[in-house]
Image (cartoon, rainbow, N blue to C red):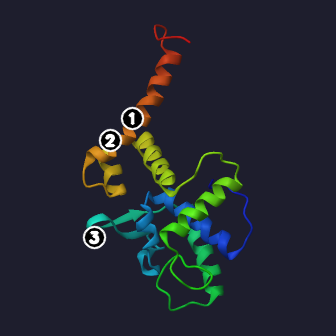
């Protein structure tokens, strides 16, 4: 989904920045939709997020997402809505809403030939699973996702366990062979 072959239009640049930011940061849909321009620190590659329960956190963002955001902001300026505080806007200068973001991600999923429905939470899930798989640090992933309770984050350990079980089954001499 992130490697889509897109045109260089205002909307495709915006949508690409949205998808890169979702995957790079693990933000919730409402958190991303609520971002303002001032919430992005390009120098330190951080996003200031207000999450559930009005709790704030700083989330690091990868260089690909930062590049996509910078490209989007160049295109956004061409729309001419300089007084709009929202990071992601429509062609009419209004804040892009939650439902619109869902529709755009679904659109790109279909365009990429992905048969099942693609929704923003799938990118958050991929972020969490990949971070946990690479680091093994459940507590850090909990903080990045903004989970109040670690049991919510533990859902992602199940995915990692499935991978371990597959590796075991295929590699151990006394494992169940299929």
Q: Residues within 10 Å of mark 3 (few under 14, many from 20)?
A: few
Marks 1 and 2: in contact by CB < 8 Å?
Answer: yes
Which residue position is annotated with label 3? 54
Residue 26 vs 38, above or below: the answer is above
Residue 168 vs 83, above or below: the answer is above
Residues under labels 3 and 1: Cα distance?
A: 29 Å
Hey, which quadrant is residue 49 in on the image? Answer: bottom left
**Left or right of residue 131: residue 76:** right
Q: How crowded is mark 1: few (under 14 residues within 10 Å), some or many (20 or more)?
A: few
Residue 79 locus on image (x, y percent): 64, 86
What element does badge 2 sit on? loop
Which residue position is annotated with label 1? 158
Task: Please state the total of marks drawn on the protein image.
Answer: 3
Which residue position is annotated with label 2? 154
* Image mark for residue 104: none
Residue 32 locus on image (x, y percent): 45, 68
Q: Which residue corresponds to the image point at 51% horizontal and 53% vertical from the top-left?
A: 123
Hey, which quadrant is residue 158 in on the image? Answer: top left
Residue 95 locus on image (x, y percent): 50, 79
Q: Residue furthest top?
A: 174
Q: Which residue corresponds to the image point at 35% horizontal and 50% vertical from the top-left?
A: 141
Marks 1 and 3: in contact by CB < 8 Å?
Answer: no
Residues under labels 3 and 2: Cα distance?
A: 23 Å
**In the rendered image, which quarter contains the C terminus?**
top right
The answer to which of marks 3 and 1 sits earlier in the sequence is: 3
What element does badge 3 sit on? helix
Residue 16 visible (yes or no): yes
Marks 2 and 3: in contact by CB < 8 Å?
Answer: no
Q: Which residue corresponds to the image point at 29% horizontal and 47% vertical from the top-left?
A: 139
**Left or right of residue 87: residue 68:** right
Q: Which residue corresponds to the image point at 28% horizontal and 70% vertical from the top-left?
A: 54
What element does badge 1 sit on? helix
């Amino acid at each position: 989904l992130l490697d889509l072959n897109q045109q260089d239009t205002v909307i495709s640049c915006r949508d690409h920045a949205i998808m890169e930011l979702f995957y790079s940061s693990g933000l919730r849909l409402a958190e991303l939709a609520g971002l303002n321009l001032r919430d992005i620190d390009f120098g330190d590659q951080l996003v200031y997020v207000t999450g559930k329960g009005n709790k704030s956190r700083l989330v690091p963002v990868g260089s690909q997402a930062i590049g996509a955001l910078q490209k989007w902001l160049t295109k956004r300026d061409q729309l001419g809505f300089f007084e709009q505080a929202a990071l992601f806007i429509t062609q009419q200068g209004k804040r892009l809403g939650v439902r619109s973001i869902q529709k755009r991600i679904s659109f790109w999923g279909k365009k990429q030939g992905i048969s099942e429905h693609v929704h923003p939470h799938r990118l958050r899930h991929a972020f969490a699973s990949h971070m946990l798989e690479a680091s093994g640090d459940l507590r850090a992933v909990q903080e990045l996702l903004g989970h109040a309770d670690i049991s919510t984050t533990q859902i992602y350990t199940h995915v990692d366990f499935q991978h371990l079980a597959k590796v075991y089954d295929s590699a151990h001499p006394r494992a169940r062979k299929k």
